[in-house]
Image (cartoon, grey):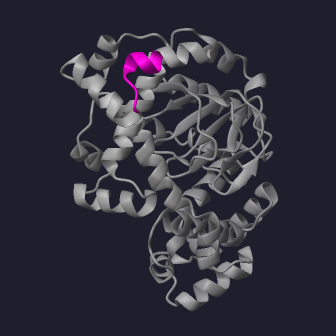
Amino acid sequence: MITKFTPETDKVYFIKSNSLFHILEGSGSIQVDFKNYTDWQDKLIYLEKGQYIKFLSPNFVIRKIEFEDEQVFQDKEVRVLFKHLVSLGYINFDQCSDCQRYLSSTVFNNENASIIDISSKQWFWQNPFQASKEEYHIIFDIKEVIDQEFQNHLTHNDVADLININGNIAQELVKDKVGFSIKKLLSNKLLLESKKELAFTQKNVQEVAYDLGFKDPSYFNRTFKKVTGQNPKDFREIYGLQRDLFVQDLLNIIKAYHQDKQTLDFYADKMHMSVKGLSKKVRSKMNASLGQLIRQEMILTAQKMLSESESVTEISRQLRFEEPNHFSSFFKRYTGLTPSEYQAKTTASS
């Protein structure tokens, strides 16, 4: 699926399927998995399912391609784009003429796998770690084991055994080409997943520790603080991302559907909650009812359409009122003005 959109500033976008991000316009930093980047210009960025991205400045315009066909990723040549070893997975767009031809086409075909093939070849041509293909396959075999088994707190020899290679050879190869030890790659993965659990879930610290394979939560606390300088509770307080995500997600859903859907059960279903549970959470976090939020968005849409000289009949139709006079009554109840009075006031002020 190919989309073009303007992201909200500082909103967390979770990657639900392996995706390509091409930044068409904008300036400033982006954040991926708690790391900020300013060197994204002239790159195609590849993000793996389970990562997140944030845009830390306004005015970004993004082209996004989601690769939903899992068959594509059975090819080991492809994983180099998504299995990040040190930084972002990317290719240099300005050096890839085939990529430019594909993405400059005004009509996209459904064969999104072709941009994957083009990009994989470009990545190997760039050869970021100055390794042979055989060496790359060993390195990325190691990375896959780390991604799958990090909760088991493996040693570098354990990792090597799982891909049937001598531990010393594996260690030397990764250290030489990537610049990190296997132990460091393991600890980096464990730290990243620790941060995600703390920032994006409501599990308590003890639950997070156990889920990540720590038998002693106190040891998890000490290890986390040693690496980050913050204990897990302080980290959660500082980032506070989960609290913001609930509000952001709900408001985005209301914004997307309020013209067609005004029932509470629709939004509860979208948020994967009961109506009672969602209503209670909305009231506690936003000091408003779910119905108020929906009505506020309807009023904002109506005001925008009135300022653009749309008729009451057309606005009534788009907001799913049975009769134009029902819309007029609704609008006056919440704004104190009839639609025509609001339109006249807007026209006069402009």
Query: Is residue 322 placed above or below 149 in the rendered structure?
Result: above
Which image quarter holds the N terminus? top left
In the image, residue 146 lies in the stretch drawn in magenta: no
Give the vertical position of 61 relative to 158 (above or below): above
Depth check: 89 or 226 in front?
Answer: 226
Hey, which quadrant is residue 232 in on the image?
bottom right
Name the one closer to the observer, 117 or 47. 47
Residue 313 against residue 285 in the figure, above or below = above
- Snapshot quadrant of residue 256: top left
Say left or right for 102 vs 342: right
Please report the residue visible at 68 percent of the width from the left and 17 percent of the height from the top: 100
Residue 211 pos. (x, y %): 45, 76
Tell me, yes or no, whether the highlighted magenta stretch contains residue 338.
yes
For the question of whether residue 163 can be seen, the reply is: no
**The C terminus sits in image quarter:** top right
For image coordinates 29% across by 12% down, the residue present is 313
